[in-house]
Amino acid sequence: MPADSPDKVIDRSAKLVFSFFLSSAGLWLLMAALLAYLAAAKLTDPFFLSSYEFLTYGKIKVAQANAFVYGWGGNSIFAVSLWILARLSQAEVRGSVFLVFAGVIWNLAITFGLLGIMDGHMSGHEMLEMPTEVWPAMLISYLIITFLALVIHRSRQVRETIAPQWFILAALLWFPALFLIAWNGLEINPARGTLQTVLSMWYGQSLVWLWLTPVALGAAYYLIPAILGRTIDKYYLAIFGFWCIAALAPWSVVHHLEGGPVPMWIPAVGTVMSIAMVFPIAVASTNFHATAFMDIGKVWHSLPLRFVIFGTLSYTISSYIGVVFSLPAVAKITQFTIINEFHFNQRVYGFFSMIIFGAVYFALPRITGREIPKAAKSFHFWTSTLGVLMLLLAYLIGGLTHGVLAGQPSLPWSSSVIHSIQPYFLITKFAFIILAFSQFVFVVNVWRIIFPNPFVYFSAENKEASV
Amino acid sequence: MNNLAKFTIGIFFTLGMAWLAFVVGARSQFGDLVPTSEVLDDDGSVPEDAELFPVDISGMAKQGAEEYAALGCVTCHTQQVRRVEAGFDVERGWGKRPSAPRDYVLQEHVLLGNSRIGPDLANVGLRNYSDEWLHQHLFEPQSIFPSSLCPPSPFLYQLVDEPVYSDIGIAPKNNMDKNRTVRPSIRANRLVAYLQELKQDYELPEVSFIETEEELVEEEVISSAGGEAPKWLQDQIDTGKEIYMKAAPGGGMCFACHQQNGEGIAGQFPPLAGSDWVLGNKERLIKISMYGLMGEIEVNGVKYNNVMAPPGIPPGSLTNEQIANVLTYIRNDWGNSASAVSAEEVATVRASLKGRAPMQMFTSAELTTPIQ
């Protein structure tokens, strides 16, 4: 038997961890899909399940965002980051037991956090709604995972680092810093008055910009050249793009406070920095698309890459839309409307999740040696595309309608303004149903690959490990 | 980039700059705001004996804030009136002035929110909603605003067979429970207490009231012309609605029988929405509003047999102007659209009835015969 290639050895070392995080991520994705459907259904029929307090709209909506970001986002970040770091470092994943242990704690913490939200212990801080009791468990388990990811990186064979490593490492390190800052400012030394809101909004928005976004960008920087077999075009710009995001994104996120009861410099700085975000967006866009369009045929035929390019295109387009919407004249209309939903869903579905799907379809066969049926992948791609486009268009057009009508004080609120955007909620409900089907197919296939025969998995794993 | 320690310092430096600004800087700028008086002395000090604002909310309301946070109301409701140049909030009547950071310094839960599927609630306590109205809205928002997306919260209420004083007189939609009334739980009462105390009705040295040309547009009020109502008409409708909804001296408590939505209760109280009586002859309406009505009456072809005591608290106490306003209101809401009633018209009718014994209720026959 010939010696395995180094990549194979690494992939095998990552198998347990990758499988664990990916299968948990899948379950959270389905949970989030179910909650998203319930929330959307409640907006089309307020009496739907209205007698159950734990399913009231405010709780469901918040639980959905948390399940999505921490459950699906967190677990898939761990899976993809650990594997990409191991591959790029040419080092094996070590301490799998600790990683799985920390992962179990992380998942338990989120489970209890969501139950806490539904049971009426919501904190009211943006993206930190889970009760404070679970925060320590989240932080500790996260730090264990990050530490072991850094161990992989430190034992790398090549000293030079490249773009995917910067983005992924930065994301891994930023999260605990953000979390601690928010924890300190909201619970340990709670700030008074609207300072709380400045902080929780800064945290909630930074989570998307400094945690989900860099991991997805890092994965794209890894996958595009790896699949196409060519280097990133104008790669020298990547470092500029990275530091632009690092320096500008934490400032830009507070523009949502425009006009509110905070000192005027806060949203003003946010707006200026949001406009400056065109630079990193342009860099990422150039890097990805200039490379991809050199070989567009190959992009089309490689399903993982199709997902990734969908994600990067959506990132580029909607980030530019975001820049336009942060201009004060436009923000006056779009602020507080369901355009917020457009931004959130674009980030987490249209961009982050699509790239993660691509990464999973690329990594899973290499790690497990088994391939997901092509028809299933294709179904997943097209239904995701359809669902995401429906969802985003409905929120975008609905949000503009919402804003324009709300801006006319003579129109009564519910009978005119809200009544006019109800059709868009109906569209989002159907979009969430499509997405739920799509994700169900994805998760079932991932589980079937990971656990081809659930009852012998662990014994088989042990045998493999002892070989 | 290749040295992990240097890289880490670099990325934490960029994050730290934003942290310095938004956390440390903002805290030193406005982290120590305290309540102050509406107007300061010339030397910038708070005058002695001046009332300080914001005032702390009651204990009941604080518990209500917990409920508000736990139910996730902030998902759809903001609590901030934006500056005039940044939005339409003051114009829409959501506040007398923009909110200021100082308004929130005493709040434990600062729930500014960032989404408005529901209206802003920073000043919901200023909108003259009665507790009953708010309870009804929490119990079933769609009974007040049919196209509202607000989730009903029946879990905060109990259905009881024998009403007591504190129960709210609303009938649940479900036919089976029609004869039962709705009793608020302590949690519902806390929530209502909190909503009633949400108000920024004072000026601060840094922000004063804004005079608006536009009058507040009350939700769901449809002007008679279908478009913009003239200000005097809108005033009459608004005041009329208050009387219609008010269950205290000076009010008519009309909603108790004819319901908030003007639909009445089938078989018991006739509807006002689309009613041939309401949209028809004014004199009859004025007479009913002064003396009440008893016995059989046919409305839109349906017969009712009940007693309507002279409206007002105490009965029959509505003034000419109040009657004019409330009648104008019922003729111009729920899709109704008919000419306004003036206080002079009421005065004329009142003069013509001189000598009629007080509280002597009209009958349908008495009202219809002379007209035909």
Image (tube, helix red, strand yellow):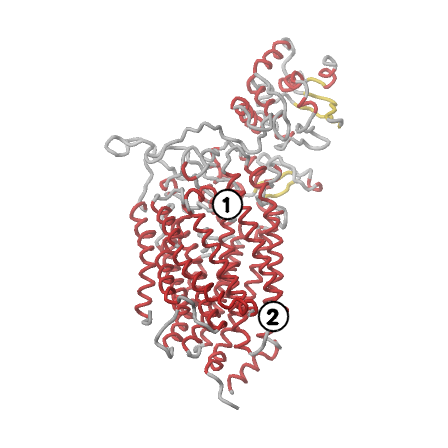
Residue at the spot of label 1: A337
Which three-letter amino acid code belongs to the residue tagged 1? Thr
- Where residue B241 appears, x then y in whole percent? 56, 27
Look at the picture and state if A8 lies above or below A289. Answer: below
- Where residue A47 appears, x then y in whole percent? 63, 46
Q: Give me the residue at 66% from left, 27% from top.
A: B272
Name the side, left or right, on which A313 lies relative to B158: left
- Where residue B296 appears, x then y in whole percent? 74, 23
Residue at the spot of label 2: A445
Residue A203 visible, this angle: yes
Q: Give me the residue at 31% from left, 31% from top.
A: B39
Judging depth in this view, the residue of A126 and B286 nearest the camera is A126
In three-dimensional space, the C-alpha distance between marks 2 and 1, rounded to whole angstroms, equals 37 Å
Judging depth in this view, the residue of A77 and A292 nearest the camera is A292
Image quadrant holding the N terminus of chain B, namely bottom left
- Point out the residue furthest to the front here: A294
- Where residue B195 appears, x then y in whole percent? 49, 39
- Residue B250: quadrant of the picture: top right
Look at the picture and state if A117 lies above or below A87. Answer: above
Q: Secondary structure at mark 1?
A: loop
Q: Secondary structure at mark 2?
A: helix
- Residue A93: quadrant of the picture: bottom left
* Dot placed on the residue nearer the N-terminal end, 2 or 1: 1
Which three-letter amino acid code belongs to the residue tagged 2? Asn
Q: Chain of mark 1?
A: A
Q: Chain of mark 2?
A: A
